[in-house]
Image: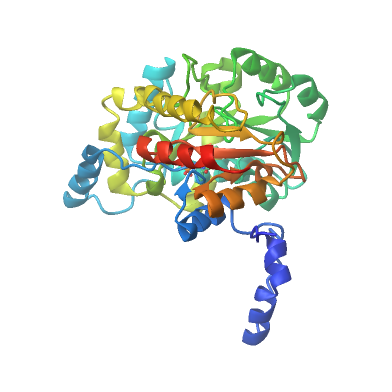
């Protein structure tokens, strides 16, 4: 089998054990014994080795706006090269508040409710660490983004996994009601959803609000694809729901919005009391985030079309990719949001999704992500995820290869 690099794989390889013996230092008792290298690293590395088109890890295959790059060097040359304030540059927090006002008609206080973090990953980790105590249950919908579970477990929390309903990955609210126990402390949601693209509806918000009403449960809402929704849909932030907002940490990322995943600049919006606790963790996790980049983004945000045009930009790519998929044997439902497209292949072969992803990378030179890795158990719904945040020519070439693939 292809070495999915899990903790178990490392242990089996004997690598850690032997190296510790040679150096005569005690073996580390892992806090995350079942965790290895993420599938994103594994597949991107394989794509590189195989010289395949990399539609696996989610990052844009084109550069960010040169205006944004110029702004970074401008602020560097003006001497903005030292620590930013712990909570983020005031100018950026104000710009985020302004964006929230423009897009959601909601006022958030930049001083007490917004924290700039080193990517959404840090915001998610800090929110989980701030709220989850040993023995607390955390509701996670799966397939789930891979950073949630390790963060929960490092805090001693117990993830309670709830499967999303096929084929559209919507939420079975009766099932949720039956799974939320008195021990539940946090519910993690993700809209638009990675990997399925599912976008929450107003009914989803209402159902969630009814479940958490009168309970001491917080919500962590991962909204990194907030500006990428299709077919006239509207992204419904948890900030737009007055009851939910009082209990929610809402996280986002400029990596997705401005094609700068390598800059790792994200943020978290939460009520003052929650922000106080989040910042206690953030203060010692990273303390603060790159100063010139924060200043550049703050200025770049002034022109709202720069984020408002993103849905149309990616819808053209989703449509182009889905049009080409029609000439492959895959089945699919066009994504509602995000920059990922799922395809089903169970009617074609019994091959595991990991094996198929590896085979397509090696033989057809197109890399994808197997969906089973987004599940905690052994589920394999026989689906692959393709990232369409790539140049049109690259997408067309990948489609040509997939159309010729012998699956
Ligand atoms: N949440 C989801 C659902 C993601 O897909 C990603 C990664 N792209 C992140 C969080 C992490 O965002 P960042 O790169 O800003 O840390
Ligand atoms: N969010 C990206 C994805 O889903 C990957 C981020 C990462 O590599 N950690 O592909």
**Quarter assignment of residue 19:** bottom right
The color scheme shown is rainbow
Residue 252 in picture, x, y percent from top left: 47, 34
- Asked if residue 355 can be seen in this view, the reply is yes
Q: Out of 249 and 230, give the one closest to the viewer.
A: 230
- Asked if residue 304 can be seen in this view, the reply is no
Does residue 55 lie above or below 216 as drawn? below
Residue 296 in picture, x, y percent from top left: 27, 40
Give the side of residue 133 with respect to residue 309, left or right. right
Residue 321 in picture, x, y percent from top left: 47, 30
Instruction: Identify the image quadrant of the C terminus.
Output: top right
Does residue 113 lie above or below 200 as drawn? below
Q: Residue shown at 57%/48% (left/top)?
A: 360
Instruction: Identify the image quadrant of the N terminus.
Output: bottom right
Q: Out of 132 and 57, give the one closest to the viewer.
A: 57
Give the side of residue 34 with respect to residue 269, left or right. right
Q: Out of 72 and 315, give the one closest to the viewer.
A: 315
Q: Out of 137 and 392, give the one closest to the viewer.
A: 392
**Quarter assignment of residue 334:** top right
Residue 121 in picture, x, y percent from top left: 52, 44
Q: Residue shown at 23%/40% (left/top)?
A: 66
Q: Residue shown at 58%/35% (left/top)?
A: 195
């Amino acid at each position: 089998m292809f070495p999915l690099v899990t903790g178990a794989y490392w242990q089996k390889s004997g690598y850690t054990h032997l190296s510790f013996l040679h150096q005569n230092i005690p073996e580390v008792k892992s806090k995350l014994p079942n965790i290895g290298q993420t599938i994103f690293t594994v597949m991107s590395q394989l794509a590189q080795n195989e010289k395949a088109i990399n539609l696996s890890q989610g990052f844009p295959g084109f550069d960010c706006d040169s205006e944004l790059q110029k702004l970074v060097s401008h602020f560097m040359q003006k001497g903005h090269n030292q620590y930013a304030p712990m909570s983020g540059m005031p100018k950026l927090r104000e710009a985020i508040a302004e964006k929230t006002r423009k897009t959601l008609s909601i006022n958030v206080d930049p001083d007490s409710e917004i924290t700039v973090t080193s990517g959404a990953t840090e915001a998610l980790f800090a929110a989980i660490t701030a709220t989850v105590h040993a023995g607390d249950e955390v509701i996670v919908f799966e397939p789930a983004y891979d950073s949630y579970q390790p963060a929960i477990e490092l805090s001693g929390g117990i993830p309670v996994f709830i499967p999303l309903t096929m084929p559209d990955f919507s939420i079975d609210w009766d099932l949720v009601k039956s799974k939320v126990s008195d021990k539940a402390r946090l519910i993690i949601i993700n809209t638009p959803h990675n990997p399925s693209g599912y976008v929450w509806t107003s009914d989803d918000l209402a159902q969630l609000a009814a479940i958490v009403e009168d309970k001491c449960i917080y919500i962590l809402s991962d909204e990194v694809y907030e500006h990428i929704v299709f077919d006239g849909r509207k992204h419904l932030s948890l900030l737009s729901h007055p009851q939910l907002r009082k209990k929610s940490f809402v996280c986002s990322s400029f990596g997705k919005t401005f094609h700068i995943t390598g800059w790792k600049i994200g943020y978290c919006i939460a009520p003052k009391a929650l922000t106080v606790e989040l910042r206690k963790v953030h203060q010692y996790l990273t303390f603060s985030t790159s100063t010139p980049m924060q200043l550049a983004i703050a200025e770049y945000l002034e022109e709202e079309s720069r984020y408002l045009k993103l849905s149309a930009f990616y819808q053209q790519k989703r449509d182009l990719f889905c049009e080409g998929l029609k000439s492959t044997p895959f089945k699919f439902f066009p994504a509602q949001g995000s920059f990922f497209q799922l395809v089903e292949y169970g009617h074609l072969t019994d091959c595991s999704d990991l094996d198929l992803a590896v085979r397509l990378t090696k033989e057809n030179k197109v890399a994808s992500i197997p969906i089973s890795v987004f599940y905690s158990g052994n589920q394999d719904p026989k689906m692959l995820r393709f990232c369409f945040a790539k140049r049109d020519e690259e997408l067309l070439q990948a489609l040509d290869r997939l159309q010729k693939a012998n699956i």
